[in-house]
Amino acid sequence: MMMMIVNLTPHPIHIYAPDTPDVVGPEHKPLYTIQPSGTYARITTTRTPSGTITVGGWEVPLVETTYGSVVDLPDPKPGVLYLVSLACATEMRHSGRDDLIVVDRLVRNSEGTVVGARGFSRVATRMIDHDTVD
């Protein structure tokens, strides 16, 4: 079944071939680009001043951030996957929704900047107990 992907991030998502190396040069071109839909799923935040930190002789504000709920996330639709940020997908992992995906197997340029991905992932609903993993 063909699935439609709706990009709920503010960034174009460049999809590369699965065998693309981790770091690419200008000779590597994406297979496809998923443009932003214009709707951006996000997590509400409240920032409370918490002091400053001195960095290089400059006072830089420090805040305590409280994360709230995911907003601007459309209701599920048959045949539609919603591409969201990892933060949104993680927040929604216990909602029962299986239509939320994130980029996976990131591709970077020679400066280390993410330029795309080689696949997608769903965030698991369970956490791994690292004390019992072999």
Image: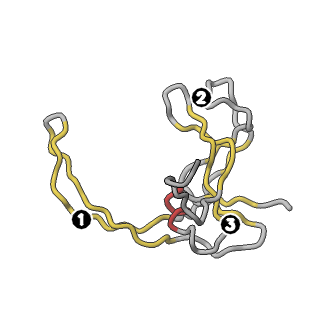
> At label 2, which amino acid type do we have?
Val
Report the amino acid beneath label 1: Thr
Kindly check if marks 3 and 1 are in contact, taking CB atoms under 8 A apart as contact: no
Label 1: which secondary element: strand
Residue 48, located in which quarter of the rendered image?
bottom left
Q: Quadrant of the N terminus?
A: bottom right
**What is the crowding at mark 2: few (fewer than 14 residues within 10 Å), some, or many (at least 20)?**
some
Q: How is the image coloured?
A: secondary structure
Please give the label number shown on residue 23: 2
Decide which of tag 2 and tag 3 comes sooner along the chain.
Answer: 2
**Residue 9 vertical placement versus 68 (above, below):** above
Tell me how far mark 2 sits from mark 1, CA to CA.
Answer: 38 Å
Which residue in the structure is indicated by mark 1? 48
Which residue sits at x=19%, y=38%? 55
Q: Which percent across, then down, holds residue 70?
A: 49, 70
Which sits earlier in the primary sequence, circle 3 or circle 1? 1
Residue 126, how many percent across, how many down? 58, 64
Checking the image for residue 99, the label placed there is: 3
